Image: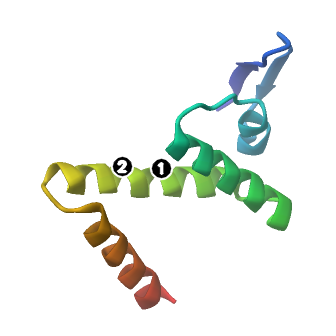
């Protein structure tokens, strides 16, 4: 699905490319900035997959938010994600 993006110079883009969209964002939130950097790094290193990188990272953050609301400490969540990475690798 194509998205319409208007950047800070009022230039209009119509694209479904996550890398193009991310490059035009002016993000303030620290966690969102990390997602933007991850998408850019993926695009620069591999040339593709920025959408997957951003979507997957966003889902991990969403899952972490739910775990925090359940009472888990962020260090416990990080430990769990680290164990999951080790298991997958």
Residue 5: quarter of image: top right
Residue 58 is marked as: 1
Local packing at callout 2 (Cα closer than 10 Å; few below 14, some 14-19, many 20+) is few
- Tell me the element at label 2: helix
Residue 57: image location, x then y, percent: 51, 56
Single out the residue that lies furthest toward the top. Answer: 10
The chosen color scheme is: rainbow
Residue 14: quarter of image: top right
**Residue contact between numbered discs 2 and 1, judged by CB atoms under 8 Å:** yes
Total numbered badges shown on the rendered structure? 2
Residue 68 is marked as: none
Q: Is residue 23 left or right of residue 60?
A: right
- Tell me the element at label 1: helix
Local packing at callout 1 (Cα closer than 10 Å; few below 14, some 14-19, many 20+) is some
Name the residue located 31 percent from the left edge and 76 percent from the top edge. Answer: 80
Residue 13: image location, x then y, percent: 82, 22
Name the residue located 64 percent from the left edge and 32 percent from the top edge. Answer: 1
Name the residue located 63 percent from the left edge and 32 percent from the top edge. Answer: 27
Q: Nearer the viewer, residue 2 or 7?
A: 7
């Amino acid at each position: 699905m194509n998205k319409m993006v208007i950047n800070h110079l009022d230039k209009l883009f119509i694209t479904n490319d996550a890398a193009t969209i991310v490059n035009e964002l002016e993000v303030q939130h620290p966690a969102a900035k990390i997602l933007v950097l991850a998408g850019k790094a993926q695009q620069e290193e591999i040339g593709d997959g920025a959408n997957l990188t951003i979507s997957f990272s966003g889902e991990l953050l969403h899952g972490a938010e739910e775990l925090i609301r359940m009472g888990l400490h962020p260090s416990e969540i990080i430990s769990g994600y680290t164990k999951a990475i080790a298991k997958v690798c």
